[in-house]
Amino acid sequence: MTNAEAPKPIKVLVRRHSRTVRITHWINAISLAFLLLSGLQIFNAHPHLYWGQQSNFGHGWLSIGAYESGGHLHGVTLLGATAVHTTGVLGASKVGAVWVARAFPPWLTLPATQYLALGRRWHFFFAWVFAINLALYLASAIVRGHLQRDLAPTFNQLKPGHVLHEIWNHMRLRFPKGEEARRYNVLQKGAYLGVVLLLLPVMILSGMTMSPSLDADFPWLVDLFAGRQSARSIHFITASLIVLFFFVHIVMVVLSGTWNNVRSMLTGRYAIQVTPPPPVTPEAIGDAP
Amino acid sequence: MSLPRPPLPRRAWLQGAGASLGALWLSGCDRIAEDPNVVKALSSAEVLNRRVQRLLGRGALAREFTRADITAAFKANGTVNPPDADYQAMAANNFVDWKLIVDGLVERPLALSLDQIKALPARTQITRHDCVEGWSCIGEWTGARFGALMDLAGLRPQARHIVLYCADTLGGRKYYETLDVVDVQHPQTILAYAMNGSPLTVAHGAPLRLRAERYLGYKQAKYVMRLEAVDRFDHIAGGQGGFWEDQGYDRYGGI
């Protein structure tokens, strides 16, 4: 046998993302960007996080502040008992030519200047956009089977051997190819399910728990997060996890084929390389035992 | 061991370019972020907040806590000692000359002394105070039921809001707030004269302050001098229905 006749892999465009997934993905991305920046503006109004119902002033588990020494402003971030000097990024940042005390720097907040009232307006507007969009996505994903068909891991994918194998492949930047690339791998499924079923809903619920009116109407919200200040902390931590997901997501998009991934989220079509079955020839039949 | 390298001119140029691009980006952003039309469009979400929250749970009581939960160092925010001379004179005299005026769209305008207010049906509640900045403190409040006071004055049917005029001047402007009539009869809407079992201190709003427990801290007006029942508030001060509302905060204040 020679390799000359071995079939070459051919590029096939498969339908990967439904229109609903594509539209809700981009609305979600835009909303989250506005929510993050306006959220950091709101955080800056009291850059201290606590556990429980109330604020134990001076004993937050996370605290961002500034102090003056030698005519200079220094930014300090306190994580528990650990103090880290974060001048220039957290606590103290340069605005124009002057140093100002503010937790997150102007380039990370919306609006850039310290303006809590306006930050809240942006935040609550996009909170509605984000929540309605997520509700539409989840309703569609359940009704049309996207969740069960595309995101739920199969029994075989959940076997520890397979999961470890995928982790090992990802660490070597080897991604599923060919027929295997038709579906999400188990790490993708886990990450996406974690975001849409856990992180994003937790953002909404912990955000609602910070509302005194909603707490009166739904006291279980406060119990769910073990206090309003805990809810504020969890809101911040979950937002941080979404930011972490975003960076990993972008790295994976780039490493596994930027244009192919972006196109699939714009047009729905995703290219995979498939090897067609070898052509059936009389010779081949003759060789069979 | 690496020796410090002199900075490349190109890097310095890039940093300069980056900084000015950044400044342009930020100022451009804020021009859009603060544009009145944009802000107006964004405010549509606040109407939604208020309507949905009123629809979902009209009148549910805010959680009440036990004495063990009370915050030792309850933060006093905003005005902590009114600079106003008339207030200082009343405070020096232990508020014996102080009277609460109730007028506007009421059947019987009133001028009540602190003792008269203390004789009204009262309520004590240990509740969580949530500041718009993000922190929370728990305190015990005792005061006259707002509804009982309004029953005494007789709210006219045209009345839609109660304006609370305060004694303190903050940043050159008199503090005031507005409360919707829907909140007047809420059991936890009280005019508090005691905190944690003692008369209200000046820092916390002596002699009388509002507690409306379903709302954020800036709605809880301190140093209350006068209640006016109105059908509209757009002619008062900045026209937005409150000291902080005039500076861009939402009047609903429930989230």
Image: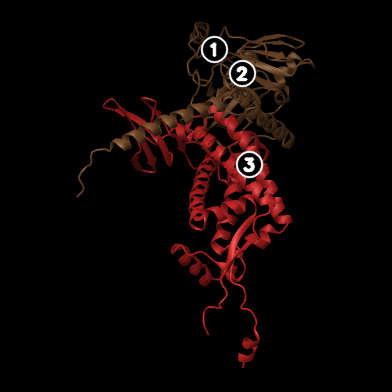
Chain colours: A red, B brown
Q: Is A67 left, or right, of B2 in this rendering?
A: right
Q: On the image, numbered disc 3 is attached to which residue? A: A130
Q: Is residue B158 above or below residue B139?
A: above
Disc 1 packing (10 Å; few <14; some 14–19; many ≥20): few
* Circle 1/circle 3 CB separation < 8 Å: no
Q: On the image, numbered disc 1 is attached to which residue? A: B173
Q: Amino acid at mark 3?
A: Phe
Spatial CA span between label 1 and label 2: 11 Å
Give the percent coordinates (x, y) of residue B107: 77, 11
State which chain disc 1 sits on. Answer: B
Name the disc covering residue B242, or none.
2
Label 3 element class: helix
Give the percent coordinates (x, y) of residue B93: 51, 8
* Circle 1/circle 2 CB separation < 8 Å: no
Q: Residue furthest front?
A: A4
State which chain disc 3 sits on. Answer: A
Indicate which label's residue lies in the foreground, 1 or 3: 3
Label 2 element class: loop
Indicate which label's residue lies in the foreground, 2 or 3: 3
Badge 1 or badge 2: first in the primary sequence: 1
Q: Amino acid at mark 2?
A: Gly
Spatial CA span between label 2 and label 3: 29 Å
Q: Quadrant of residue A12?
A: bottom right
- Asked if badge 2 and badge 3 are on a common chain, one would say no
Give the percent coordinates (x, y) of residue B21: 43, 31
Q: Quadrant of residue A83?
A: top left
Closer to us: B13 or A96: B13
Residue A206 visible (yes or no)? no
Label 1 element class: strand
Disc 3 packing (10 Å; few <14; some 14–19; many ≥20): many
Q: Amino acid at mark 1?
A: Arg
